[in-house]
Image (cartoon, rainbow, N blue to C red):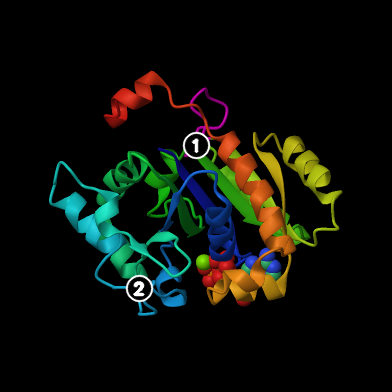
Amino acid sequence: MGLYVVASAKGSPGVTTSAVVLAGAWPVEPVLADLDPAGGDVALRYRDEAGAPLDPERGLLSLGAAVRRGNSDVRLADHVQRVSGGLEVLAGVTSPSQVQGLGPAWLHLARAMRVVPDRDVIADCGRLMPGSATVPVLQHADAVLMLARPTLEGLSHLRERLHSLAETLQFGTHEAVPTGVALVTSYRDGGVVGEVQSILDRSRLPVTVLGILAEDEKAAEAIRVGDGRRAAKSLLLRSGAAVAERLHRLARPVSQSQNAEWGVA
Ligand SMILES: Nc1ncnc2c1ncn2[C@@H]1O[C@H](COP(=O)(O)OP(=O)(O)OP(=O)(O)O)[C@@H](O)[C@H]1O
Ligand SMILES: [Mg+2]
């Protein structure tokens, strides 16, 4: 099914927290894939359903090893773990050098994540840099969500990064990867969505501002420690549900040629 990237241009606007929020509200059952090249946080934050730490041997690295061995039937399901609360996750790497070690396997990893039969994959790609290891994942995503805080610096880094990723995301072509932006700010700051959309339009960036992810420290902290119940009914979860629905709708329809390319019936 679909592959959805969540990332930022600079700073730590809450990519991991937001990816967890989006996964919790996703319209179909998702896998949360921790692909942050700087090192994953998901396996450090969450425990399995029995309360034990996640198995560090099972995740992105084991999937990468299977892909590199050239197994024809690599299944994402063999590498995910279910965390307390029910979410399935692909644990990330513990150090950036492991990401470089995956090298050319990234293209095949992107493929493995896109052909999962009954799951969408929400991938936390951390900060995006041109030339970063996760570029193949971006290129093959069904939609990309960039998170930013709507400050002068946040927006100027966002604009710069989107311009530098224009080729990767094939902006201006029929194959462009649908790209959205979510703003991490007060939920009362409603006018900011239109303002940021105008700024991005004036910069000729073909991206859609999908809404606000509410700035909500208490709920973010509850999510960080895996206490979803404490975050229930929070503005963060409610705003996340709206953004999840819009991001899911933003995805490009899968064409027949893409299906053939990816070997999907
Ligand atoms: N919507 C939010 N409102 C308030 N605080 C938030 C929100 N989202 C995240 N935070 C807080 O910001 C900090 C960073 O969050 P998180 O780890 O999700 O960010 P990140 O962008 O993934 O960072 P990193 O670059 O370390 O991967 C955490 O303390 C988290 O609780
Ligand atoms: Mg993170």
The foreground one among 9 and 91 is 91
Res. 122 in view? yes
Q: Position of residue 90 (x, y in %)?
A: 36, 60
Q: Residue at x 53, y 73 (%)?
A: 226
Compared with residue 76, is residue 41 higher up or lower down, i.e. above or below? below
The foreground one among 210 and 228 is 228
In magenta stretch: residue 171? yes
Res. 159 in view? no
Of the residues shown, which amino acid type is indicated by label 2?
Thr
Residue 73: give its label.
none
Of the residues shown, which amino acid type is indicated by label 1?
Glu
Q: Which residues are magenta?
A: 168-177
Q: Position of residue 230 (x, y in %)?
A: 64, 73
User: Alpha-carbon distance for marks 2 and 1?
Assistant: 30 Å
Compared with residue 256, is residue 148 higher up or lower down, i.e. above or below? below
**Which secondary structure is most common in the magenta stretch?**
loop
Q: Describe the element under mark 1 as helix, strand or loop.
A: loop
Total numbered circles? 2
| Residue tagged 2 | 94
Rendered-image quadrant of the N terminus: top left
Q: Residue at x 37, y 26 (%)?
A: 258
The foreground one among 5 and 115 is 115
Q: Describe the element under mark 2 as helix, strand or loop.
A: loop
Q: Is mark 2 within 8 Å of ligand 1?
A: no
Q: Position of residue 120 (x, y in %)?
A: 43, 44
| Residue tagged 1 | 167
Rendered-image quadrant of the C terminus: top left
Where is residue 207, by image quadrant?
top right
